[in-house]
Amino acid sequence: MAVMGKTKSVLTLTGRVINEAVSFIVFSLLDLFDFLLCYVYKLADFFMEAEWKPCYCSSGKEAITSSGKILVSEQGKSKIVCLSSSKLQLEEISDTLYTRPSLVSEVSNLTVTELKRLKVTDRTINVQSCEKIKNGTVRSTFTVNSTIVEMLQGKIGKQQLHPIPRWSDCDCKLCISWTSSCKETLFVRAEGPKGNSQNKAFWTETLFPNFSSAAKSTYRLFAIDLLGFGRSPKPTDSLYTLREHLDMIEQSVLEPYKIKSLHIVAHSLGCILALALAVKHPGCVKSLTLLAPPYYPVPKGTQATQYVMRRVAPRRVWPLISFGASLACWYEHISRTICLLICKNHRLWEFLTKLVTRNRIRTFLLEGFFLHTHNAAWHTLHNIICGTASKLDAYMDAVRDHLKCDVAVFHGQDDELIPVECSHNVKARIPRARVKVIEKKDHITIVVGRQKSFARELEEIWRNSSRN
């Protein structure tokens, strides 16, 4: 037994070393490939649209905001720069959008530094910031990420970009149906007479048909496509921040349907929105059910956004789901290429799937994964999962101390995207939360394949919370 245990340890260590070595080589090549794609897309955008959209790989400087101001950081020193609009809540913008260390970025930063010394900077803008000190006022010049400034100039000036998707996005009737509506609201499917709410197809094709007649006659069920996904609006000028997502949920569900009490069910990224919504409307929430919540407590002294990005996307080739997450999170232009190949051509992929499987499986999951734009997926991933990293502890504490609702957490034992420890972290922060780990289930099959039993579990949670 001792020999077998030692052999297993050696094999595990060897596998880990090989994985890290291969990952280093692969991701170094991907760093270079993404760098080259940046210029390819600039040329393509200019050819197709007569202008190119700014990207986040232009500058490595930090630009975050607080209370309508931009916080500029350079060489460890921070200053506040005021903006002319009070509506922009820039503190929601994650620094992971433009600060993703790589070999290419390090070389690029060194090059930019040398160019600055020669006063040959053409990709950034200068902003003046004032700092009061005891002996007077000192003026300093700092560099702000040009991408964010260019995107915000349109918002500050209240300029509306054309709603039709970019050339690299799908323009089928399903994807652009929102443009024909005079009011921008999320795509919502409501069923039943009386309160619940989250991606539409994921819920309507799995849970809705499996709820009992009693549940359907007691509760009014809502399933929504989040902003930027499915049939919901996909504005090209949106930064898809937490505030924008919450505002759209309120405007599309809570306000028009005059909901005063509700049970919230959320999966994966949606759990963050569910927590924020629950904290914002504490008196309305009767139960909170979270599936695979991406909650990573951040160690003290660690930058929250960067820590969570590395946990979600560890830059490893194995397991494959981590490799996919790393591609989506670390590479702006590679992920855009993936969206170009898959999302823009989702109808072809749906057809091929039906052809290969002889129409034996339903393709609703393809709708959930493929019906989005790169702009929506990129910003939502960074601004919601990474950008809220420093807020989740406060949300958890608010649920623990100020909300009386039931909290239930479900997690697949074989989930390789979000580890089971995340759900146990929720339990550690909210002691009354009930955690159920489902054996032999992963990030998707925690619902798909066990929808009948999960529907019964939800009905029981709702019934029990109604009695309290």
Image: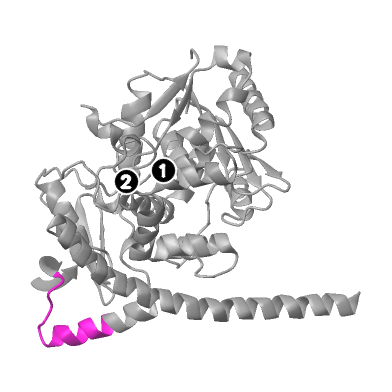
Of callouts 2 and 1, the N-terminal one:
2
Residue 450 lies in what quarter of the image? top right
Q: Secondary structure at mark 2?
A: loop
Q: Three-letter amino acid code at disc 1?
A: Arg
Q: Three-letter amino acid code at disc 2?
A: Cys
Task: Tell whether position 110 is magenta.
Answer: yes
Task: Tell whether position 422 is magenta.
Answer: no
**Residue 326 point in image, percent of width and height:** 47, 64
- Estimate how packed mark 2 is, as few (under 14), some (14 to 19) or many (20 or more) residues with alpha carbons within 10 Å: many
Is residue 111 in view?
Answer: yes
Specify whether 55 is left or right of 383. left
Label at residue 464 = none
**Residue 442 point in image, percent of width and height:** 64, 49
Residue drawn at the location 32% of the way across and 77% of the way down: 105
Residue 51 lies in what quarter of the image? bottom left
Is residue 198 in view?
Answer: no
Query: Which part of the image, by quadrant, shows the N terminus?
Result: bottom right
Marks 2 and 1 close (CB-CB < 8 Å):
yes
Q: Is residue 22 above or below residue 278?
A: below
Specify whether 400 is left or right of 378. right
Which span is picked out in magenta? 109-124
Mark in the foreground, 2 or 1: 1
Query: Which part of the image, by quadrant, shows the C terminus?
Result: top right
Residue ID for mark 1: 347
**Residue 271 point in image, percent of width and height:** 49, 42
Residue drawn at the location 64% of the way across and 32% of the way down: 451
Closer to the camera, 221 or 363? 363
How far apart marks 2 and 1 lie (CA) works out to 9 Å
Q: Is residue 304 above or below residue 465?
A: below
Q: Secondary structure at mark 1?
A: helix
